[in-house]
Amino acid sequence: MSSVRREKITCNAWYPFAEGKMEIFNRDNSKNTGHPAMLNSWMLIGSRNSHAQNISIQISEIPVGSQQPMHHHAPEQCYYIIRGRGIMMIEKDEEDVCAGDAVFIPSNAEHGIKNIGDDVLEYLTANSPMFDEQYENRLWPCG
């Protein structure tokens, strides 16, 4: 099987799946939330740029001293901490997390994460079912 590296994504772009080709996504060819002072998040695999049907993934970075606001959504979610230290908040629970930790977030649970370390807090998230296109358009707009 050969692979296809996608070019920089453009607004409302749809990349047709080439039979027998692997789709490869990264920060350079994925949409970004565009909020670098608070949080940078790239939609690596989602409803608008892949043929995924049941899962979406993002990679996010939170600068030192910042945090992801508490929020909720229908898809279940998992966070995997790649780098840094943080406080993971789910509903009323708070736990310290660091590189190598994975956290499960139930559907519609209020959650967020705060960077409490000396470096960027970097984490990967996976969502199932995937975020719908309307949710993606709101958080990962064109630009």
Image (cartoon, grey):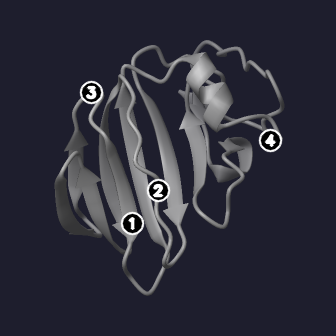
Figure quadrant of the C terminus: top right
Q: Secondary structure at mark 1?
A: strand
Residue 122's place in the image compared with 22, above or below, is: below
C-alpha span from label 3 to label 4: 31 Å
- Name the amino acid type tagged 1: Lys
- Which is more foreground, mark 4 or mark 2? 2
- Name the amino acid type tagged 4: Lys
Q: Which residue is mark 3?
A: 107
Q: Which residue is mark 4?
A: 8
C-alpha span from label 4 to label 1: 30 Å
C-alpha span from label 3 to label 2: 18 Å
Which percent across, then down, holds residue 24?
59, 38
Q: Earlier in the sequence, mark 4 or mark 2?
A: 4
Q: Earlier in the sequence, mark 3 or mark 4?
A: 4
Question: In the rendering, which numbered label is found on residue 114?
Answer: 1
Q: Earlier in the sequence, mark 3 or mark 2?
A: 2
Q: Earlier in the sequence, mark 2 or mark 1?
A: 2
C-alpha span from label 2 to label 1: 6 Å
From the viewer's perspective, is 62 left or right of 91?
A: right
Q: Secondary structure at mark 4?
A: loop
Which residue appears at 33% of the width and 61% of the height?
81
Asked whether the beta carbons under mark 4 and mark 2 sit within 8 Å of each other, the answer is: no
C-alpha span from label 3 to label 1: 20 Å
Q: Earlier in the sequence, mark 3 or mark 1?
A: 3
Residue 34's place in the image compared with 53, above or below, is: below
Determine crowd level at label 4: few under 14, some 14-19, many 20+ residues with C-alpha closer than 10 A. Answer: few
Asked whether the beta carbons under mark 3 and mark 1 sit within 8 Å of each other, the answer is: no
- Name the amino acid type tagged 3: Ser
Determine crowd level at label 1: few under 14, some 14-19, many 20+ residues with C-alpha closer than 10 A. Answer: many
Q: Which residue is mark 2?
A: 68
Which residue appears at 26% of the width and 35% of the height?
109
Which percent across, then down, holds residue 74?
36, 22
